Image: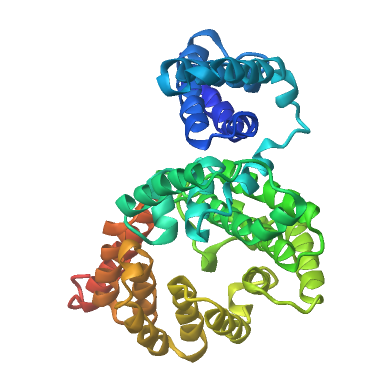
Amino acid sequence: MTAPAESRVERVLREHAPHVLGAVIRRHRDFAASEDAVQEALLAAAQQWLRDGVPDNPRGWLIQVASRRMVDSVRSDTARRQRENVAALEIGQIIAAASVESAPDQDETLSLLFMCCHPALTAPSAIALTLRAVGGLTTAQIANAFLVPEATMAQRISRAKQTIKASGVPFQMPTARGRAERLSAALHVLYLIFNEGYATSVGAGLQRLDLASEAIRLARAVYELVPGDAEAAGLLALMLLTDARRLARTGPNGELVPLTEQDRSRWNRGQIVEGVALLTAALARGSVGQYQLQAAVAAVHDEAARHEDTDWPQILALYSLLERMSDNPMVTLNRAIALAMVHGPAAGLEVLGTLAADGRMANTHRLDAVRGHLLELAGQTPAAVSAYQAAANRTTNTAERNYLLTRAATLRDSDEAASSPPGLA
């Protein structure tokens, strides 16, 4: 089978997996069993569709296969034999309704989003579980988002499934009141899915358009569900204002183009206008949250005609306020950059020194990358080269690694040329 066919199958599976999982869970209300069944269906589809082609109703096909796996599971479980007929009846209903479940206006992913933010779970566990089910992220990617080791995250996700099962609370779409209680966790999930799509932590490409686009779609759906919520509006604004720069972030060969060098004529002005309008309306409501502040930072960048025109004092003030709201080392890292742009690289490097002792930064390359940038601004070339190389050795994204290694090599060559005797350069 040709590579384009294989790519199409993978794309279709990624698109439909959350919808299928949501449909099966909503009917059967057993997360762990449904997830196992859907994974088996996806594996079966990956093999059969490459051979026979993608069916006309891929979502219905996946639901039927997953449902049959559920039946097999019920039949093989001695302790549940007495409920076999009831389970089989429910499965039959799923299969009969497969065409309905796959209707375009049936957004099972939005339902699954709120279902996973289960009241029996702590917020971090609910978010981790939802990233797996809704975003399709790997354990490694989720661990990267939380700044924890992969083994720790694997245990957290496993415990989350067990907690839901032991709680006795139905795993189903909550009421309007229940959705309101789970809204904060749901927004955080979408924020992390978008971040992974905009700057993927693992792989050859810098971005994953499918994840970023799905996060924007769901954020828009959530905003339409709760139009009066300022943070839902702020999150959608943040995504639009950030995604507006997507086309300019990579060069012809997929290489990373930093913000300072981007062709701003390629930025999506329609997204910027919509994002600013959403943010302005949200800020006018008087309750300012973290997503609104991050959207404000993105808006300051987007509204600058040139990098040199960026209002760094305003960005510094916004990050300072964000830092007081949350205990997030990545906010402090961004404040260090803004501080360096306003008061000089030495001021930013001093803040980085306090971050070095934060254990959460041990699982990310970004501290070394920012340190390299600030050392470069300070004219400390050998130290900047070392920091860039350290960051390159720690990142798992190929595009970022190539950029960091190229930056280190360019600085090193420039420094060697400057120090060479006349006539030998």
Query: What's the residue at 51%, 21% (across, down)?
Result: 70
Inspect this view and state whether residue 406 appears: yes
Q: Is residue 102 something that shows in the picture?
A: no
- Name the residue located 61 percent from the left edge and 81 percent from the top edge: 318
The residue that appears at 57% across and 53% down in the rendered structure is 194
Residue extending farthest front: 82
Count up the numbered dots: 0
Of the pair 258 and 393, the residue shown nearer to us: 393
**Residue in the picture at 62% in, 35% down:** 22
User: How is colour applied across the structure in the image?
Assistant: rainbow
In this view, the residue in front, 399 or 224, is 224
Q: Is residue 418 left or right of residue 173?
A: left
Residue 43 as seen in the image, left or right of residue 315:
left
Comparing 28 with 361, the one in front is 28
Task: Point out residue 28 in the picture as x, y percentages from the top left corner.
Answer: 60, 29
The residue sitting at the top extreme is 52
| Image x and y of residue 140, in percent | 37, 48
Q: Looking at the picture, does residue 65 appear above or below residue 389?
A: above
Residue 300 image position (x, y, % from top left): 66, 74
Looking at the picture, how far across and down is residue 283, in whole percent? 76, 75
**Which image quarter holds the C terminus?**
bottom left
Compared with 118, 33 (above or below) is above
Residue 228 sits in quarter: bottom right
Q: Quadrant of residue 322?
A: bottom right
